[in-house]
Amino acid sequence: MKIPFSWLKKHVELTKSPAEIADDLVRLGHEVEGVEEPRAAVKGVLVGHILCKEPHPDADKLSLLKVDVGQDAPLAIVCGASNMDAGDKVPVATIGTCLPNGLTIKKGAIRGQTSFGMCCSETELGLADESAGLLILPEDAPVGCEVGEYLGFEEAVIDLSITPNRGDCMNARGIARDLAADGDLKLAEIDDVALAPDGAVSAPSISIDNETDCPLYLGRRIEGVTVQDSPSWMQAGLIMAGMRPVNGIVDVLNYVMLFFGQPMHAFDADKLNGSVSIRSAMKDEPFAALDGRSLKLHAGDLVVSDASDVIALAGIMGSEPSGVTETTTNILLESAFFRPARVSETRRSHAMVSEASMRFERGVDPQMVATAMQQATAMITDLFGGKAGELTVCGSSDNINAGKTVHCSVAKLETRLGVEIPESVDDVLRRMDFGIARSGDKLEVQVPQFRHDISIPEDISEEYARVIGFDAIPEVLPALATTAPARKDTSIHEAVAGGFLQVVTYAFISREEQRLFVDNDGADIELENPISDAMSVMRRSPWPGLLNAAKYNLNRQQAGVALAEQGRTYMRTAKGNSERNVLAWLMTGEVESDAWYGSARSATFFDLKGAVESWLAGRGLTGRFIADDSIQGLQAGQSAKILIGRNEAGRIGRVDGDIAEKFDIDAPVFVADIDLDALHAGKQAKFMALPEFPGVERDLVFLMDRKAFVHGSGNDAILQQVRKAGGKLLTDVSIFDLYEGKGVPEGMISVGVRFTLQDPSRTLTQQDSDATSKAIINAMQKMFSAALRG
């Protein structure tokens, strides 16, 4: 938000320089982006009087001018504009002048004729984005005067970034109030505009059907206006404040809004049908907005309507059909207070933003609603004629954000800030319209109506900090109660240590992506106001986000991708919404590149399975991978659930080809996830001395039904049975061979099991080895009907 320095001076008599005022504003908690100096930017541009105009001898579109700029002799200037003539007064940039667009004026020859300056347009002076010719000045403009001074260019314009909680400061008066209170200066009274309504102009018929969202609405009819451009001083002020002039009526309302903080709107009264009502919109009710968009409104949106159509989205934007144009003669002027939350919800749901909505959703001053109406009415009738009728008032400002009292402990505020709060600071807050009453350590604060952001003691401490100055607060940590140290979650770090790249994806996904891995069982948590359709529900699986990240990387010539993410999944349950802490992996593409020692190799199911097993082993856990073809989104025959003990803790498998294709991935994609909340504490690693006695390694080869091998979850089930049968002497077991083909009956499979036996206290005997082998053979026979091959 830009505020011309002269506007501040109209509210408070400032004696400091703009740079010093900017420093004061920063100390008071306002972000100052910069201080512009428009008058200094056109220093050297003088009022010139064109004495004569002749055609350029070598160019049809150029003219030779003799211009008096108050110097010893007239300047010869070559000009390409055509809208000037002898006798006109125009801005002239003399040699050495640097214009706002960065152009430095130099003496130079143009098609053989020497030019000693340049006549300027509004664009070159920074007054407009485009212009049709030179800026023609009034006849009484004094020759040789600085154009910036003559046109009333601002000494300075302060560019502020107002924080969202300070809606009261999104105008010149709000900023001036803070400066006046801080400097113990008098804040100027607002001129009391006494308007005698014209009895010939009828008062508009207005009703409020939704008093919760609109507790106050003022309307007035003004007849006989002549819509034309606003005066140059107003246009210049609006441009300096960063707004584009539109037409006289709109410019007046924008000027009042920037000056006093109250947004207003004007309707073409002749385009309205019947009485006006402020009500809630019906679902899919049409609305043609001023910005050219056609909207279908949501049920509950607050609107202003006549007897047939919606004429405004309350506090945000008017309708195009009811807008004021150059042909408008009768207007309906609106000034109101709309509930901030309602304006914010409606604006976000329709992705709309306007200067009015930015102020309404932060909260405007209820007492300024009537004042702004009077000020705007007076300016419109003074500048554009017309007769103003009686004011129609619906509701009252008395109870809007009124009567808020915050009780505080001075000692607690001082502890929070780390400094003593002298009573003299109370006077500054009183000048900001706070009611302050101290009684010992007790502090009672009456909050002014325009401060919608004050409700708790912490807000009061912030106000004291602003006045004292944040620089005065010592850089010392306050004494805090000790708490038990939180255990650091290293889950994602351990996954990254396993060769995966950490990613963070959005917790919001589309409904279509949700259905890829989760049934539509009504447990989705849907957002009321999603940013877009692609972010409409809270994720119940981390895999869609990982697939999008994989797609992004593969599209940028990454041959292989290995990603890991730790985040939360969300779902609705009978007991309310629940969250789960999940660690997820994804692998696709190459895991090994071409090299002299071998060829490139793509990721397989077992690469990811090994990574998950290593991660679990690092936590002292052992997982069992049980084949499960029912996992949605994973390919049958290459998917499994992960059991830790008897609890299902995760899933792993290959993504269905059709799903991978939706993400433009043509290579096999493998994913896994672990529910971290479902994990129990693993075995703590203990030191064991190196064994003094050798171990015994034995191989057993079994012949078993292939269906029993697959349905029994293959390797994991066999290894589990061997570990149980091996007893305490078993230190290691693995499957070293799987074979089908010649020599093996059809439907059967040959499985080779290798195990190691060792006792740390003695050398094992043949009897030990034979007993363990027999136990393993019996277990395999019992569990899988497996026979030992000869």
Image (spheres, rainbow, N blue to C red):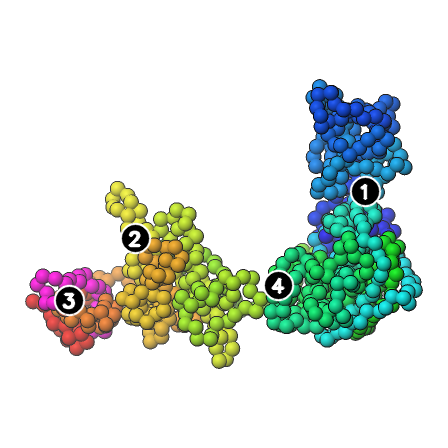
Which of the labelled discs sits on residue 749, or is there none? Answer: 3
Which residue is tagged 2? 602
First along the sequence among labels 2 and 4: 4
Measure the C-alpha gap from mark 3 to mark 2: 27 Å
Circles 3 and 1 in contact, beta carbons < 8 Å: no
Between marks 3 and 1 in the image, the one whose residue lies nearer the viewer: 1
Residue 185 forms part of the magenta stretch: no
Q: Residue at x 86, y 68 (%)?
A: 202
Quarter holding residue 330: bottom right
| Label 2: element kind | strand
Residue 204 visible, this angle? yes
The boundaries of the magenta stretch are 724-746
Amino acid type, label 3: Ile
- Residue 457 visible in this rendered orientation of the protein: no
Which mark, residue 732? none
Q: How far apart in space, not on screen, are marks 3 and 4 (Cα)?
A: 67 Å
Reading the image, the residue beneath label 4 is: 295
- Identify the amino acid type marked 2: Ser
Q: Are marks 2 and 4 in contact (CB under 8 Å)?
A: no
Q: Nearer the viewer, residue 358 or 581?
A: 358
